[in-house]
Amino acid sequence: AAVEKGNYRHFMQKEIFEQPTVVAQTLGSYLRQADNSVALPQLDFDISEIRRLTIVACGTSYYAGMVAKYWFEHFARVPVDIDVASEFRYREPVLEDGGLALFISQSGETADTLAALRHCKANGQVIGVVVNVPTSTMAREADLLLPTHAGPEIGVASTKAFTCQLAVLAALAAHMAVKKGLMNREEEQSVVSHLLETPACLNAALDHDDDIASMAHLIAPARDVLYLGRGQDYPLAMEGALKLKEISYIHAEGYASGEMKHGPIALIDDEVPVVVIAPSGPLFEKTVSNMEEVRARGGKIVLISDAEGLEEAGEGCMATIEMPKVHPLIAPLVYAIPVQLLAYHVAVVKGTDVDQPRNLAKSVTVE
Ligand code: G6P
């Protein structure tokens, strides 16, 4: 049956709101709620023996991989290489035996990602595929198939596939850590129970839809927007910027907060909104000082943080978006919601074709 928009104005909006459900579905197939354990399909290789991880993807799927790099390093202590597929396939990556190459794709058909997959296969890597279309070419060529259960994604700008990819990748990183003896039973239970809190936290984030809609007119007139994030929230800054440029045609850049002073700070004036993605936590202070640098130049800030962060740094911002206080592991999934909604509502204000933005294709099957 054809997928319908139902009561939503756009597929993208519908898909944003489906995330609590589809992330729960996806987590449900990788985690066991009964005893809070990770339950991956039987692997026919020993994941604890994997010496290097190579992650390759394009677009939004690439940013999911960038978030996962932090998790694989943190939990499983495995060295991770990550690249966009179009670069990976034309450099000379050093692929030694004993490596796992992970390809992340909504469609499973992106030409560059597929070419990179075949290159890795020919060079002795175990091929893992995180994919939303189970009948796709990449799914068929996988040694380790890790499906996301996002359901059909119609909006050209990826939303629910992204958070489902993150759900799978978090489970895989935890699984690897368990198998390597780096995560004991108690730690596994804690990680899994936090992951299982995600759908409720996504719902709490979606509750701010109206607030975000009502601030969209502050961003819509901008010519440029800067997104800042640190650590595992840095890829989200890039994803936020990508979403905004894709559907609202506003030039946007995602930057690591600490790198701002090495370039983008030159752009800041009162016409360049700066969206800061910063849950409270150990690195928050550093982001606050980056915000001060922005403010000192007349920059206008939209701060996305939890109550604690907003209490400390919300004053003087052009706008704030309050997120629930969440465990750092799931923050990238939860903070994906406001960046998606912000791009969505800005595009609606601008009157662009949200589901079919100009010049873009849902799946890029040619080089
Ligand atoms: C296109 C789409 C993006 C998507 C990217 C990668 O550019 O417009 O939304 O993130 O391809 O697609 P994939 O299907 O490989 O995830």
Image (cartoon, rainbow, N blue to C red):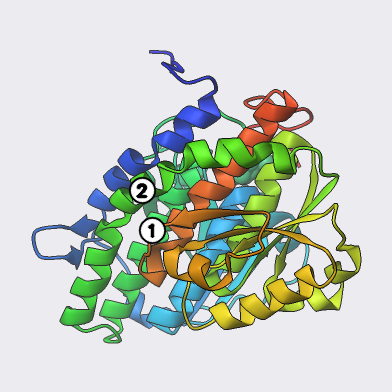
Q: Position of residue 71 (x, y in %)?
A: 44, 73
Look at the numbered disc 2 and give the secondary structure of its residue.
Answer: helix
Residue 131, visible in the rendered structure: yes
Q: Nearer the viewer, residue 239 or 9?
A: 9
Residue at x-position 42% and y-position 35%: 17
Which residue is denoted by mark 2 in the rendering?
204
| Residue at x-position 57% and y-position 35% | 213
Furthest residue to the right? 266
Expressed as whole percent of the image width and height from the top left, the position of residue 143 reads 40, 57
Q: Nearer the viewer, residue 114 or 277?
A: 277
Residue 139 vertical position relative to residue 96 in the rendered view, above or below: above
What label sits on residue 324 in the rendered view?
1
Q: Are marks 1 and 2 in contact (CB under 8 Å)?
A: yes
* Dot 1 amino acid type: Pro
Q: Is residue 29 left or right of residue 253?
A: left
Cα gap from disc 1 to disc 2, whole angstroms: 7 Å
Quadrant of the picture in which ligand 1 is shown: top right
Tell me: 361 left or right of 231. Answer: right
Quarter residue 25 falls in? top left
